[in-house]
Image (tube, rainbow, N blue to C red):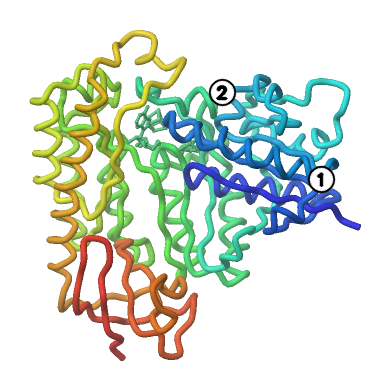
Amino acid sequence: MKKKVYIETYGCQMNVADSETVAGIMQSREYIATDNITDADVIIINTCSVRDNAEKKIWNRLDHIKSLKRKNKNLKTGIIGCMAQRVGEKFLEHPAVDFVAGPDSYRSLPDLVDENDIAPVRTEFDINETYSGIEQVKIDNNIISGFIAITRGCNNFCSYCIVPYTRGRERSLDYKDILTEVKNLREKGFKELTLLGQNVNSYYFEEGDKKVNFPNLLRMVAETAPEMRIRFTTSHPKDFSDELIETMAAYKNICNHIHLPVQSGSNKILEKMNRKYTREWYLNRIEAIRSAIPDCGISTDLFCGFSGESEEDFQQTLDLMEQVKFDLAFMFKYSVRPETYAAKHFDDDVPEEIKIDRLNRMIKLQNKISLENNKADIGKSFEVLVEGYSKRSKKMLFGRTEQNKVVIFPAQNYKAGDFVNVKIIDATSATLKSEIIN
Ligand code: SAH
Ligand code: SF4
Ligand code: F3S
């Protein structure tokens, strides 16, 4: 009888992809993945450390799992992911936790479960670990959209960010392994794939005379799966080259959507963040993208209240938002992360109530811009990849345009995985409403 493992995932898409790798590792041994937590012999929680509230969520979750363990004495719980790396063996002090593994230690998970004598904690970094040869196993029943992590780790050390400390140094996977995985997804009938990395466009792989940069790889991926939608995230502005823009423009199946986190509109703050670009560079990249790909969807990440951010600096962020008119923005307030350069050298000197006020002002402005952008789509036609039923009604389906905008439309006889042509008839700041055209 196979034992059952339940994997719960927090944080970014990289963690989603890693959970599939972990499912693959566990299934290659005596385990099978389950989506029912009360049925599980082993619970694995894949954690995030990016902001303090992401970590708070995990502690709360562990209190709940403690109660499950009271009912099932044989249940084992492991913590993996970024917070496992950061918190390490201190996790074992929590009564719900039996073992801990950081992002480079997942191959040892099946053994860790059974380890009773020595401290079951693995948090060593391994620059060579790319999980080559491990087949990812889908755990969310989504067989439409797949992820491939093409780089792991990050070398950028943005001064506020924990990721370089939780995921170690950047490494790029062998392009041949990536193309094999693309073929696998294609053969399994996936309709879309997303190439993942913390700084995906710094991908670089060298072997003898063969040198492969990100645009080269993207080209090979697009040609390997010509009928699949190809996406990639997250791009760093410093590496957003003209060659990359030209490659996107040259291939129909590379989606016209770019997630390009800007973080702040103030040069003073960008420098303090160690982002390695200026406001002017960023705006120049946006211009280059829009002139080569006029219908490109552009989204971003922004956060307010970083150390030293004055009202004037913040105004420059609002001003940049107005100038670029992002389709979508993920917005946060600064949260000090232990160990980072900013935690050691800068004061967290923007008072909490000002952070909250600025965040609210950003959100309000972005909602207005998203609504304007979406209204401008009324009357236009798009191809939509159907993902499932809309939350509100089983009579409606939802999907995404290549620009990554969410569209709803009457279900008729369509189903998840179909491509449907629609015309936009109405819009809110979050969704486009449409009718089917044939
Ligand atoms: N690698 C990506 C994303 C990293 S984390 C990139 O370079 O953009 C996702 C987002 O969380 C970041 O883009 C940033 O906006 C936000 N973030 C990261 N650290 C943060 C912190 N300490 N406080 C608040 N927001 C943070
Ligand atoms: Fe963090 Fe910067 Fe790396 Fe993104 S690029 S993961 S924000 S250090
Ligand atoms: Fe969180 Fe780690 Fe991703 S900190 S955002 S899960 S890389």
The answer to whether 181 is drawn above or below residue 343 in the figure is below
**Residue marked by disc 1:** 72
Residue found at x 33% / y 80%: 409
296 with respect to 61 (left or right): left
Residue sitting nearer the eye, 196 or 394: 394
Nearest the viewer among 57 and 183 is: 57
Residue 429 in the image: state x and y as whole percent: 21, 61
Checking the image for residue 86, the label placed there is 2
- Quadrant in which the N terminus is drawn: bottom right
Residue drawn at point x = 46 percent, y = 73 percent: 388
Name the amino acid, label 1. Answer: Asn
Residue at 69% across, 32% down: 105
Say which mark, if any, is on residue 288.
none
Residue 389 falls left or right of residue 347: right
Marks 1, 2: nearer the viewer:
1
Determine contact: label 1, label 2, CB under 8 Å: no
